[in-house]
Image: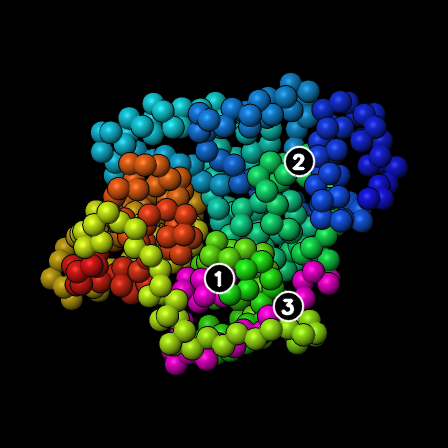
Amino acid sequence: MILTKEQQAILDGEQGETLAKVMKTLVMYGDAFEAEKLVPITSNYNHLVTSFGLKVMSPVYDLMQTLLDAGVASGQKFSVDPRPLDKKVPANLLQNLVFNKFMYTKQDFYEEQLKKLGLMNENAFTCACYMDEVGNKPKKGDVLSWAESSAVVYANSVLGARCNRNSGIIDIMGSIVGYVPYFGLLTDEGRKATWVVKVQTTQKPEAQLLGSAIGMKVMEDVPYVVGLDQWIGNELNDAACAYLKDFGAATASNGAVGLYHIANLTPEAVELGESLIAEGAKEYVIDDAELERVKNNYPVIWKNPDAAPKLCFVGCPHLSQEQLKDWTVKLEAALQANGKKKVTVPTVFTAAPAVLKAFNESEFAPRLAATGVITSYICPLMYMNNPLCKKMPVITSSNKLRTYTSARYYTDGEILQIITGGKKQ
């Protein structure tokens, strides 16, 4: 790897031993992917993936403390993934004991470290940091040092920024020195599509289901999706962005997609068109039957597959304000149609603290509360990622949550009917 004089000086220890180790880590990371150089980070803010104070993560806290003791702060302020705990979210006595006394005992301590290191503000905890309300929305062409997979794929695809799927801790390393290795999705060549996906469904495909199908097929490759614009339009409005947020999260978790192009919609596809398609690209056709095949092959790992659901999570990744409003209207209508006043399954909608703050100032907040739905800022994945929750029959419309936990996937429409008493699981 070729370093500039400034980069070499940091590596040689001219700014201290700790910063030299940070630079060495990035150089070794870049060497592993045959990066030719380091390039400057150009975004205003960074985003970290590690947000949870698990007791077993002592090496992370030791590393953070080493940085703080050496006076090394992040070169950028940053947001971070969601908190794992919220007293509003239903949990029994044993779960609360495990969460608070055994699992997340370092949460407060770790959050203090994050504040000292450069946290944007005390509520900058969300996987959807690019929401307008949160304030960490990169510009087209910005070079980032992010690690959260659903945020990386959104930033690359919908915003046209440039970021590799970094691992946790590498994200803060890049932010500290202000550089990241130049390879993969930072390069023009690495952003070319090696798959052409043709959407030939007879109705608007479920975002999480379509993303899952594509992710499992192309894995870490870049897909160029044709035919989706007929269902979600050719304008990146609130509805289209919410769809692509959920679609992208499924491609990233059910596969390892870090960038997708949607013909006639996403920035680079609009600007460059089919020139983004690499020579020899493979083809994948998705019709109604293919989506049904994918959905029917999801495993149900509940101890009792016929159990009645005890909890429902919606919002992984975090919901937008428009999605919260849309769900409110649909819930009211479904409850009325089914002769119910409140949801029949304990249900949690998750969103960024800043999004919830804005939503709570709208007329929709009391209406949603009247349905019995709980709103929270937590990470559903972190709530469920323990042996106690694995035994619970939890349902979700998130393919990411389904992939990483024992939660059972249903489409948004199916979830709506189940939680309003209109359909039994």
Q: Between tags 2 and 1, which lies in front?
A: 1
Q: Earlier in the sequence, mark 2 or mark 3?
A: 2
For the N terminus, give its image quadrant: top right
Residue at the extreme left of the image, as rendered: 339
Asked if residue 294 is positioned above or below residue 257 in the image, the reply reads below
According to the picture, the residue beneath numbered tag 3 turns out to be 193
Q: Which mark is residue 52?
A: none
Q: Is residue 83 visible?
A: yes
Question: Which amino acid type corresponds to the residue marked 1 in the rendered image?
Answer: Met
Q: Which image quadrant is residue 397 in?
A: bottom left
According to the picture, the residue beneath numbered tag 1 turns out to be 216
**CA gap, disc 2 to disc 3?**
29 Å
According to the picture, the residue beneath numbered tag 2 turns out to be 173
Residue 395 in the image, given as x and y percentages of width and height:
28, 52
Q: Nearer the viewer, residue 53 or 40?
A: 53
Residue at the extreme top of the image, as rendered: 69
Q: Is residue 33 left or right of residue 107?
A: right
Give the magenta part as a residue range. 188-216
